[in-house]
Image (cartoon, rainbow, N blue to C red):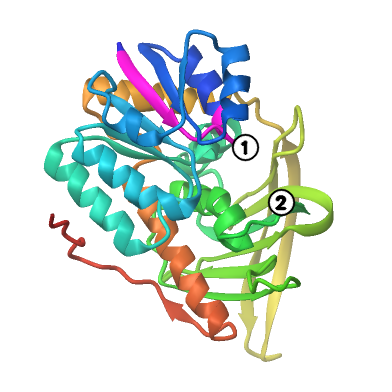
Amino acid sequence: MINVGIIGYGYWGPNLVRNFYAANDCIVKSVADARPARLDQLKKLFPVIEGVLDGDDIIKDPKIDAIVIATSVCTHFQLAKKALMQGKHVLLEKPMTASVKEAEILMNIAEQKGLLLMVDHTFLYTGAVQKMRELIDRNELGNIKYLDSTRINLGLFQSDINVLWDLAPHDLSILSYLVDETPYSVNARGITHTCNGIENIAYLTVNFPSGLIAHFNCSWTSPVKVRMMLIGGDEKMILYNDLENTEKIKVYDTGYTYYNDEERQQVLVDYRTGDIQVPKVSTTEALLNMANDFISCIKEGKQPQSSSCLGLEVVKILEASTSSIKNRGQEVIIKNLSTPAVYSA
């Protein structure tokens, strides 16, 4: 059995505790949160789990094998570094870290010590995203031409990260999982309506060498909640609506062909509209799938579906987006560092 400690029992922590409690081959030994009231809530729901005020107590506990970190992004690096240096496997909430450099240092330590470093990009474990990957692998969509994502709601304003760092990791992780191509550059625009200078509305475009384009619309200030993604191929197209209970994915047998009419000196387009299919998708809770993946990869020495490499790619895009926003939407080349940052004591 893998003994697990969880640091952070705020917004997402209770969901992690519940699912790791139900996961195979592991025991949630202790949970840390600096607020006694939160630990009181933990005790009511899980009397057998020890609650502690200081995360360092979990990190230094020799009986703990793996640590799940569900705290503010700005704390991820230091907590994860301490845990890895203590020989613990680590699962980080999204986004992985606050910078590319921090992510690469953690990956270097994990590799040196033979430990698993994983990121909780939960959507990769949903039946809907798994089905989309299956359809793409079977080449049912043909060549992917675009991805368009909208994730908006009247949401919780964050005090340390902007709306892209808060919401876009979900859809960026899906992009990285579905598309076997490394992005080249980004353009991003954002605006803040508060006095702290943190953007609450932002638009991000990710550009690929092949011409594939991905666009993300994120907002904390929408009167309606939308969680929708379009994936367009030259054979078929997918509409993914995460708010749908039963028909999360619709596959449209819709496309177009074009050719040049040299006499008229114009491009002519033929449109094709076929059937709409609604594939059946698994309804198993994604977070439980993620927890089981983390534990099984520790036991078997495998790489998880939501690997640190995927987590790093998401942070690279986010870091480039911040630079682009500061430069009023200027195109920013995504850093593709060939030599990971090396940790030195």
Mark number for residue 138?
none
Q: Is residue 72 magenta?
A: no
Q: Residue at x 63, y 61 (%)?
A: 163
Left or right of 339 in this view: 68: right
What's the amino acid at mark 2? Answer: Leu
- From the viewer's side, name the closer residue of 263 and 127: 127
User: Is residue 163 depicted above or below 20 in this figure?
Assistant: below
Q: Give the position of the C terminus as an image quadrant.
A: bottom left
What's the amino acid at mark 1? Answer: Tyr
Give the residue number, with chain letter if any, for mark 1.
11
- From the viewer's side, name the closer residue of 66 and 39: 39
Give the residue number, with chain letter if any, for mark 2.
156
Left or right of 152 in this view: 167: left
Corner quadrant of residue 90? top left
The answer to whether the residue labelled 2 contacts the one labelled 1, judged by CB atoms less than 8 Å apart, is yes
- From the viewer's side, name the closer residue of 224 and 145: 224
Secondary element under disc 2, as helix, strand or loop, is: loop
